[in-house]
Image: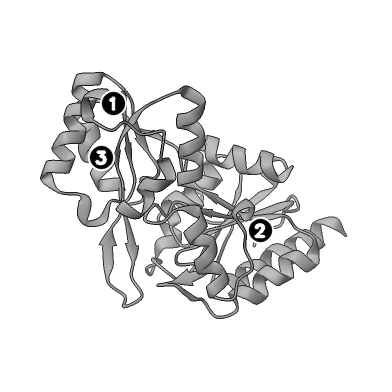
Amino acid sequence: MKEARPITGVLLDISGVLLIDGRAVPGAADAIAQLIDFGLPYRFATNTTRRPPVAMVRRLNEAGIAADEASVFSAPRAAKDFIAARGLRPWLLVHPELRDHFAGLAAETPDASDAVLVGDAGDGFTYAAMNQAFNVLMNSGGPLLAMGVNRYFRHGDGALALDAGPFVRALEDGAGITAQVLGKPARAFFEAAATEMGVALDGLAMIGDDVRDDVGGAQAHGLVGVLVRSGKYTDGDEGRIDPPPAACVRDIREAVACILERTRSASA
């Protein structure tokens, strides 16, 4: 890792970095324990929108990784705060498991909607659902809110699957508008996490397997990006962004080791 300022806080992606298909990546629990022992604040920062934050906590704990709701800084959490603060009544294009997370905030009918909120709806991305969301945007003139624009993710069996990003882009193109991104790689997402942790934005490191939205997105806002060769990583990803990642390592264990070494060296 390039030597520079010390790291004062760490953001860790969950899917592909700590968990793959619900199973812990080897050494993940030990890596988190090292951060705790060193005294570095951290958050599990995820764009996963097929499950609410409470379900992500449960999956982490079942995999042997200590977590609670306060430690999970997620796109659904950021979206809920954004919607509530602005009094919006969005039409939801999200996974069924996520609907209860927005109970009392979402519109019950398209005609009552003043925005569209998109997450990874999975099989819910039908033509009918997309067309309905498109019509809400056209009729209401409201914003298109995206909990993430990740292009794809990798299943545990190695197969790739489309994420929400391509569907957000389709709605942007159809409605002639630009989505407001509420999860990674939006600057506001990283700023909110930094504020909650009590650290400066440029003191944060982001560990991720998505070179564009995790690492490149973080680095565009002054964070240190660390790419792991697990999850959705494919050969050569580190060369697909400019500047390249501060470090490209095998897994979460090496990522945390690099961050701790950098911080020790900068503090010496």
Q: Which residue is mark 3?
A: 169
The structure residue drawn at horizontal position 49% and vertical position 32%, both measured from the top left corner, is 82
Report helix, strand or loop for mark 2. Answer: loop
The percent coordinates of residue 133 (x first, y second) are 21, 34
The residue under label 1 is which amino acid type? Ser
Q: Which residue is mark 1?
A: 113
Look at mark 2 in the image and give the residue it sits on.
2
Specify few, some or many for label 3: CA neighbours under 10 Å numbering under 14, 14-19, or 20 or more: some
Foreground mark, 1 or 3, reads 1
Q: Residue at x 53, y 56 (%)?
A: 245
Residue 193 vertical placement versus 65 (above, below): above
Residue type at the position of mark 2: Lys
Image quadrant of residue 237? bottom left
Asked if residue 213 lies left or right of residue 115, the reply is right
Can you say which quadrant of the picture contains the C terminus?
bottom right
Q: Position of residue 127 (x, y in %)?
A: 11, 45
Does 130 appear above or below 31?
A: above
